[in-house]
Image (cartoon, rainbow, N blue to C red):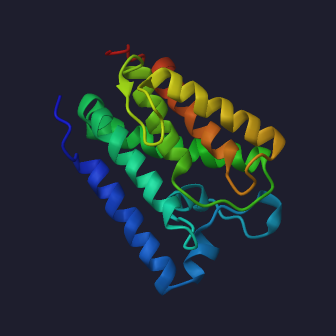
Amino acid sequence: MNSQMTPIVKNLLIINVLFYMAQFAFPATEYYLSLWPLGSGEFKLYQLITTGFLHSTRDIWHLGMNMFELWMFGKFLENVLGSKKFLTLYMVSLIGASLLHIALSNSRAIGASGAVMGVLIGFALLFPNMKLFLMFFPFPIKAKYLAMGLAALDIIGGFTSYESGIAHFAHLGGMITAVILIKLIWKIPKIL
């Protein structure tokens, strides 16, 4: 399987970096494009999508980790699904993440994490037994166990406010949307 950079992943990386630079050049970008709570008076429908291209300017790791995970898992998924389906997965996961966040949280949100979690879950659904070597983890872990572990952390975090400032429900929304799209709508079987 070709593991080189794929066109949609490449373009998503570029767009996210351009938005990040725009946030520095035009600070109001974050204010207007963030996902605001429904009752805030600041919510606009387009924010369901624009929020997924913003990242905290106070923490480069927010952008870095999301883009690393998008590249790491996205290139495999795009090769398997094709560019059109991969982009659909990414965008639908982003919207699902935004919807669950505004349904269950009363805070403003930014970041591609929900869409990226959809990509990660998509990878785990298609390659559940692929062993991954993670930084700061002493032994390989199968993709399905990584996905289950991250989902458990987000469920705990969402309902206990563990690691406040992280949009746990957005992560879960992206994951749930990816499962529905890949398994129930597209009915794609696992590959490995």
Task: Looking at the picture, tell me which residue is in the foreground, 8 or 111.
Answer: 111
Q: Is residue 151 left or right of residue 26?
A: right
Q: Position of residue 95 (x, y in %)?
A: 56, 46
Q: Position of residue 125 (x, y in %)?
A: 44, 22
Task: Looking at the picture, tell me which residue is in the foreground, 43 or 11.
Answer: 11
Q: Is residue 148 left or right of residue 164?
A: left
Q: Position of residue 123 (x, y in %)?
A: 40, 29
Q: Say if 155 sits above or below 12 in the image.
A: above
Q: In the picture, which quadrant includes the N terminus?
A: top left
Q: Say if 10 sits above or below 146 in the image.
A: below
Q: Is residue 13 left or right of residue 80?
A: right
Q: Say if 111 sits above or below 118 in the image.
A: below
Q: Quadrant of residue 17?
A: bottom left
Q: Is residue 105 visible?
A: yes
Count of marks placed on residues:
0
Q: Is residue 185 visible?
A: no
Who's the residue at 33% across and 47% down the image?
71
Who's the residue at 67% across and 29% down the image?
152
Q: Say if 153 sits above or below 168 in the image.
A: above
Q: In the picture, which quadrant includes the C terminus?
A: top left
Determine the residue located farthest toward the bottom in the rendered image.
25
Q: Position of residue 177 (x, y in %)?
A: 56, 33
Q: Is residue 5 left or right of residue 71?
A: left
